[in-house]
Amino acid sequence: MNVFSRLFRIGTAEAHSAIDKLEDPIKMTEQGIRDLKKNLDDSLKAFAEVKALAIRSKNDLETNRNRAKDYENKAILLLKKAESGEISADEADRLATEALTKKEECAAFASDKQKEVDKFDQNIAQLDANIKKLRSQISTYENELRTLKARVKVSSATKNINKQMAQIDSGSTISMLEKMKEKVNQEEALAEAYGDIAGESKSLDDEIDTAIGGANKAEASESLAQLKAKLAANKKEE
């Protein structure tokens, strides 16, 4: 019996140690979630900044494309004015050349902005993927944390029950119950003894009174018989 009890207690101690170790994963998971949420906040901030830069680049791209188209239209208009004689051919050529130069500058600037826009689009796509991944990881870890906390509660309750069971000594409990039974038996016997003593301890006066009491009853019975006889006689005379 003692061997099994010892083995049970050893197993309980090991279980307690394992339960205590559950606290570390919980704290680590909580810290990991906090770190991931900070990373998520940083990623969202970077995402917004990159999108803002992308919007500006797209606006610059569109503006320079429009300006390049506008300079080209102006060069065409200048050449038409020269054909119609409104301005000289030399002047038209000079101004048209300047307009086309401006067009090429705007086109080159727009080409650079297109590269920026493409790069920003790639960054936005990457950041968006990272944000989704971070959110997924946070959700996963939060679910794992809830599971760990639930396991700790169950394990803690089990630990307390096992601890109480381990502290129960069936041998001493049975011994205590036997002692209580012996005590009760002793008290019952003592009560019965006192009852017998009370019945045997009548005084002489008690015995005399008891005897007199019996004589008085006999006299009362005789008086009753005489009274009945008297009543019967009176009834006959009537």
Image: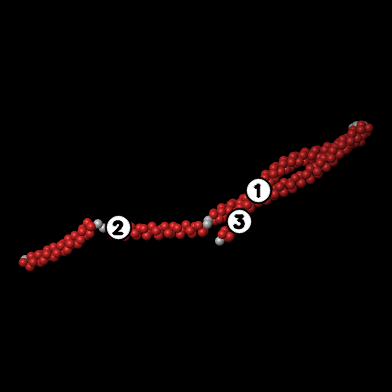
- Residue at figure coordinates x 87%, y 37% from the top left: 105
Query: As displayed, is residue 193 above or below residue 91?
Result: below
Cα separation between marks 2 and 1: 74 Å
Q: Earlier in the sequence, mark 1 or mark 3?
A: 3
Reading the image, the residue beneath label 2 is 198
- Residue type pointed to by label 2: Ala
Reading the image, the residue beneath label 3 is 10
- Looking at the rendered structure, the secondary structure element under dot 3 is helix
Q: Residue furthest bottom?
A: 236
Frontmost residue, 70 versus 24: 24
Query: Residue 24's mark?
Result: 1
Query: As displayed, is residue 191 above or below residue 128?
Result: below
Quadrant in the picture for residue 215:
bottom left
Frontmost residue, 152 versus 63: 152
Residue 205 visible here: yes
Q: Position of residue 56 (x, y in %)?
A: 77, 38
Residue 75 visible here: no
Q: Position of residue 10 (x, y in %)?
A: 61, 56
Q: Give the quadrant of the N terminus.
A: bottom right
| CB atoms of marks 2 and 1 within 8 Å | no
- Residue type pointed to by label 3: Ile
- Looking at the rendered structure, the secondary structure element under dot 1 is helix
Q: Earlier in the sequence, mark 3 or mark 2?
A: 3
Q: Is residue 47 left or right of residue 66?
A: left
Which of the two marks, 1 or 3, is nearer to us in this view?
Answer: 3
Tell me which colouring the rendered structure shows. secondary structure
- Residue type pointed to by label 1: Asp
- Residue at figure coordinates x 31%, y 58% from the top left: 197
Frontmost residue, 155 versus 70: 155
